Image (spheres, rainbow, N blue to C red):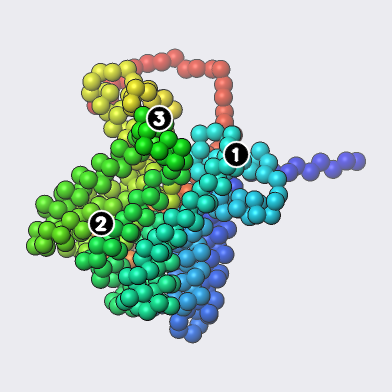
Amino acid sequence: MKTLIKTRRFSSFQIIILGFLTVILLGSILLMLPVSTRQPGGASFQDALFTATSSVCVTGLVVQDTATYWSGFGQAVILALIQIGGLGVVTVAVLFFIASGRRIGLMQRQTMQEAISAPQVGGIVRLTGFILKAVALIELLGFLALLPVFAGKFGFGRGSWYALFHSVSAFCNAGFDLMGTEEPFSSLTGFAGSTAVNAVIMALIVVGGLGFLTWDDICRNRHHFKKYKMQSKVILCTTAVLIILPAIYFFFCEYNEAGIADRIRLSLFQSVTTRTAGFNTADLTELHDAGKLLMILLMLIGGSPGSTAGGMKTTTAAVLAATAIAVFRRQESAHFFGRRISMESISSAAAILLMYLTLFLTGAAVISYIEQLPLLTTLFETASAIGTVGLTLGITTQLCAASRFILVLLMFFGRVGGLTLIFAAVSETRSTALRFPKEKITVG
């Protein structure tokens, strides 16, 4: 009698999720080791899990100050988790495949395609190789640009480590910092007046948040904007708008007491970092409620597809805006740069918006009820978590275990992506020739 053994094949989406979960678990174990903390005994599982999740999901929310609580080994683990999370677990795995000379099959190529949001499987290995080389070069340039400032302040040895850590953290849009030795949880407020640090960190954040496919398009077509793919054009234009308009608001409405040069630096930095980076050069608790609401909106939008950033993505916001404009103008379809947007993209954008709003609002309401905190404060925290930003109004360390677990779930959802989770749960595409009768329903 023959025994039939059925081998389960995981979908690309399931592999991506399992990869992230595995790295988070391993990171948590490493951070629980006594060698990972400055104080004897090691970190609790709760603190280790939260920190590992925040690192892999490149968020930046912390329950322990990174500089004063974690040892050099612990900081190195956090940096490695940030790099893996920023590149993507699958991309890092491909690096080892390439280094070992192993053949990359069709299944691996499909998983790579989903991981970096590539439009097709063809050329995916070349694109991955380009990504790895570009990341190494950009982070090296960031390190070299930050080194003179940090070495001058902290000495060459410590300054070199700080330059490397903050270059990787900024490029990966993580928001982890080592400035707690000056003042715990101070982020980059001590460098608010440094044009060099502000410019380098902002450049790394923006480049990391544009997306790997956009880089490839720019490198191929250089300054010929008309030759760019529609997605690259939408990403670049939307990114510019989401940086400039909020910066104008911050300049005129939030930092009136600062000098002109300081206002420009503060306004630009807060506008850029809100899009999933997590650093701050100003006390966010002093913002007006309108400023906090604007930051919540920016955190939810986040960066671009296939980037180190999280959030709903710039393309999602752009598609929803273009669809609304098409409805207002009574046009049949939304479009960008002479190209029509597919109904599949519009449906996906609407689904993503609904998922993010539902989880973001529900999480904030539950935390507000548990902790008895103002709703706006918890909305800021959950937007930061699901957008994988890392900005906070100072409540993260005060939250109970249940509230922290909610943030962990939101961070994981925000980094992996809502559609990835749903497609992983429903791995098979159900197609049928049967179509229900159509009937009009009134909306609005």
Q: Could you tell me which residue is drawn at 43 percent across and 55 percent down?
A: 138
Looking at the image, can residue 294 be seen? yes
Most extreme residue toward the right is 1
Q: Secondary structure at mark 2?
A: helix
Residue 335 or residue 196, whichever sits in front: 196
- Mark before the other along the chain sequence, 2 or 1: 1
In which quadrant of the rendered image does the C terminus lie? top left
What crowding class fits label 2: few (fewer than 14 Cα within 10 Å), some (14-19), or many (20 or more)? Answer: many
How far from the left and from the top, in percent, is residue 74? 49, 73
Which residue is denoted by mark 3 in the rendering?
227
Relative placement, left or right, of 166 versus 257 is right
Which residue is denoted by mark 1 in the rendering?
110
What crowding class fits label 1: few (fewer than 14 Cα within 10 Å), some (14-19), or many (20 or more)? Answer: some
Q: From the viewer's perspective, is the residue at label 3 or at label 2 nearer? A: 3
Q: Could you tell me which residue is drawn at 38 percent across and 25 percent down?
A: 341
Q: Could you tell me which residue is drawn at 70 percent across and 51 percent down?
A: 101
The disc placed on residue 269 is 2
At label 1, which amino acid type do we have? Gln
The disc placed on residue 409 is none
Q: Secondary structure at mark 3?
A: helix
Q: From the viewer's perspective, is the residue at label 2 or at label 1 nearer? A: 2
How far from the left and from the top, in percent, is residue 168? 43, 61
Q: Could you tell me which residue is drawn at 61 percent across and 41 percent down?
A: 109
Residue 240 or residue 15, whichever sits in front: 240
Cβ atoms at labels 2 and 1 below 8 Å apart: no
Q: What is the quadrant of residue 234 in the picture?
A: top left
Q: CA distance from mark 3 to mark 2?
A: 31 Å
